[in-house]
Image (cartoon, grey):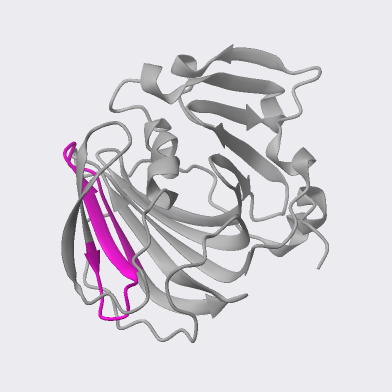
Amino acid sequence: MPSLRIPSLAARFIASTVLIFSLSACAAAPRPVPSAGPGRAVETLQSEVSLSVKSAAGSMGGRGYLIFKSPDRFHLAVLSPLGFTLMDLFVSGDVITCLIPSKQAAYQGRASDLPDRNALRGWGMMRWVVDTPRAEEGTGPGTREYLAADGRKELLSYDDRGLLVCKSNEDGDRVAYAEYHDRNGVAFPHTIEMSDRQGNTVKIVFDEPEVNQPVEESVLVPALEGVEVRPLTEFRGL
């Protein structure tokens, strides 16, 4: 299957005019029913997504398109109801680039430099969401303690098939994975819900995700020629 080209998808997706991004509480997940079990990693992902966001500023939602390439690169395209791009959000490691085409402006910087209440800070944690040790086939259900690469303790909960349903860390961040399905031989969740210690939440629902299919490098790199680049800390919304 050919890799995604963002401009050709504009007429297919609907999105809200404003999205506030941050991290939903660990919720009970339905029993997964994939034919695939644990073990195979998600190397690439391309999917339409629905997003529901709650924060101190209010609640809202929308649709877009999310692309991921291992180990830590993301691109979220947020489109208007008329089909044009409202915002392109790129994440590469700790670096976030928020491109607003209508303003010919981009905001770029490190997620670690953002204050806790900044709308973009949560997307710096997407690497943590996908960076998950996988249980071996035959591993029973239960919660296990895991020491992350940065030395912090995490708690990971698995179901009776060895599929991850929830994990949390010492900072109060949580992520839950629900409704697994077989996608190209990989057990992939239909829904991911994240929350941070301030109680901000975001729910991502995937629609027919393409897993481990080719992704062109160009869709993961922001086009900044002729664009005014400002510090990420100046971003205040669309």
Q: On the rendered image, what quadrant is the N terminus found in?
A: bottom right
Q: Residue at x 49, y 42 (%)?
A: 18
Verify whether residue 202 appears in magenta.
no
Residue 31 in sight? yes
Residue 190 in the image, given as x and y percentages of width and height: 45, 71
Q: Is residue 125 above or below residue 195?
A: above
Q: Is 129 on the left-hand or right-hand side of 5?
A: left
Q: Is residue 19 above or below residue 81?
A: above
Query: Where does the magenta region start and end?
Result: 157-177
Q: Is residue 163 above or below residue 195?
A: below
Residue 20 in sight? no
Residue 218 in the image, given as x and y percentages of width and height: 78, 39
Residue 128 in the image, given as x and y percentages of width and height: 38, 43
- Total numbered circles: 0
Q: Residue at x 83, y 62 (%)?
A: 2
Which residue is nearer to you in this view: 85 or 147?
A: 147
Q: Residue at x 52, y 61 (%)?
A: 41
Verify whether residue 169 appears in magenta.
yes
Which residue is nearer to you in this view: 185 or 59?
A: 185
Q: Is 133 on the left-hand or right-hand side of 106?
A: left
Q: On the rendered image, what quadrant is the C terminus found in?
A: top right
Q: Is residue 21 above or below residue 207?
A: above
Q: Tell me where residue 227 sits by quadrant.
A: top right
Residue 46 in the image, given as x and y percentages of width and height: 64, 59
